[in-house]
Amino acid sequence: MKMGRLEDAALDLKYLDAITPSKEDIHSKLQLIDQHQDDLNALKSFAIGENCDVVDEVTSKLLEDHPWDSFLYILRGQCHIAENRLKLAIHDFKHASKLSSDNTDLLYDMSVLEYEVGNVRDALSSIRDCLKLNPDHKKCYSSYKSLRKIVKFLDSMKNSIENEQWSSCLETGAKLLQSDNQELVVKINVYRLTCRCNREEGNVGTAVQECSEVLEFDDSDVDTLIQRAETYMADEEYDLAIADYEKAIEWDSSSETAKSGKEQAKRAKELVGKRDYYKILGVKRNANKREITKAYRKMAQKWHPDNFQNEQEKKRAEKKFIDIAAAKEVLSDEEKRRAFDNGQDPLDSEKGHHAHRGGGGFNGFHGFNPFGRGSQEFFFHF
């Protein structure tokens, strides 16, 4: 019964009925088999992809009693394809492939669908399963060569991302796009990765454009929604970032990355108009200590007051230098940085405390003088 072999099930029940007569449950099961056989005959009379509302309803009902019948999954999957519900079709075909493990044509069809929805790696996996069953399957072998090449490029790009080699990621992506003549599915897979690489390289506009093209192809791509949100954060478009994080949470309510990102975007929005230590040093919000120190040294050299002769420019540089020193203090200290990321300026709470100890001017700035001993004498050590 579970495998959908209704004739065999009926024979077994009739045999059982012959040796143990008057069993009501046997008779009711035989009646159910007759009813289900009629339903199956009706389904088989439909052309593929037609009467899909009926097919979907009847197959779903039959699968309650015949969950191991691969034919029902294939039939329902074909209707999903006809109505462009490709991900649902893949889901049903996967069930069917597990129940009929020697169906190479089904594995090939499933690979085609996986490719069309942009899951190149899954497509390659299905093709490999096909070739394990039949190494001489012409369609599977032909697809295997091209899919393997694409995945090899994508793996190289992922490796570059893991090693923070952003320009290498972009170069490899460009080569893949060039070799595949801008095939849409290939382009989407490349843009899923180059979206981040362009953001890290400072190409914010290009990153937003690439993420957006991926989301036009698949608006449920949670990873890309998060990537675009982080790109909006880098561009200080906090409302747009919050909107993307919220969409990501709608699709995947368990995504901690989206939840924490949304809260961070909301806090960043509240800080608009206040001192932004990341912006002062010109670093990204995910910058590490090495990047912060490097940026600090560069900015401090640029804005050291000794570099300016004009009195007005010197005063402006002094203010800049104070902000640079404050940014270094906050972002180099894990506790202070955490407080700042949570929407608080940790130095605000220190102002009153140091003011009554050291007076005003530079010597009263957060308990130390970033310029040295006096307002006209500046020392800076690297």
Image (tube, rainbow, N blue to C red):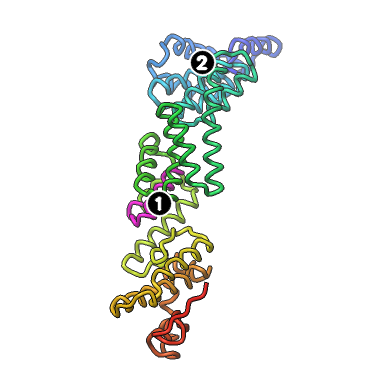
- Is residue 229 rendered magenta in the image? yes
Q: Quadrant of residue 299?
A: bottom left
Q: Residue furthest front?
A: 309
Tell me if mark 1 has few (under 14), some (14-19) or many (20+) residues whose alpha carbon lies within 10 angstroms of its own: some
- Out of 26 and 253, give the one closest to the viewer: 253
From what the image shows, is residue 190 above or below residue 29?
A: below
Regarding residue 238, the answer to whether it shows in the image is: no
Residue picked out by circle 2: 36
Q: Which residues are magenta?
A: 222-241
Task: Indicate which disc residue 13 carries.
Answer: none
- Measured in 3D between alpha carbons, the distance from the residue under mark 2 to the one under mark 1, in whole angstroms, is 62 Å
Residue placed farthest to the right in the image? 19
Identify the secondary structure beneath mark 1.
loop
> Where's residue 183, x and y in %?
41, 27
Between 209 and 167, the residue placed more toward the observer is 167
- Identified by mark 2, the residue type is His
Secondary structure category for the residue under label 2: helix
Looking at the rendering, which quadrant does residue 359 occupy? bottom left
Q: Residue at x 55, y 22 (%)?
A: 145
> Which residue was labeled with disc 1?
202
> Would residue 71 be counted in the magenta stretch?
no
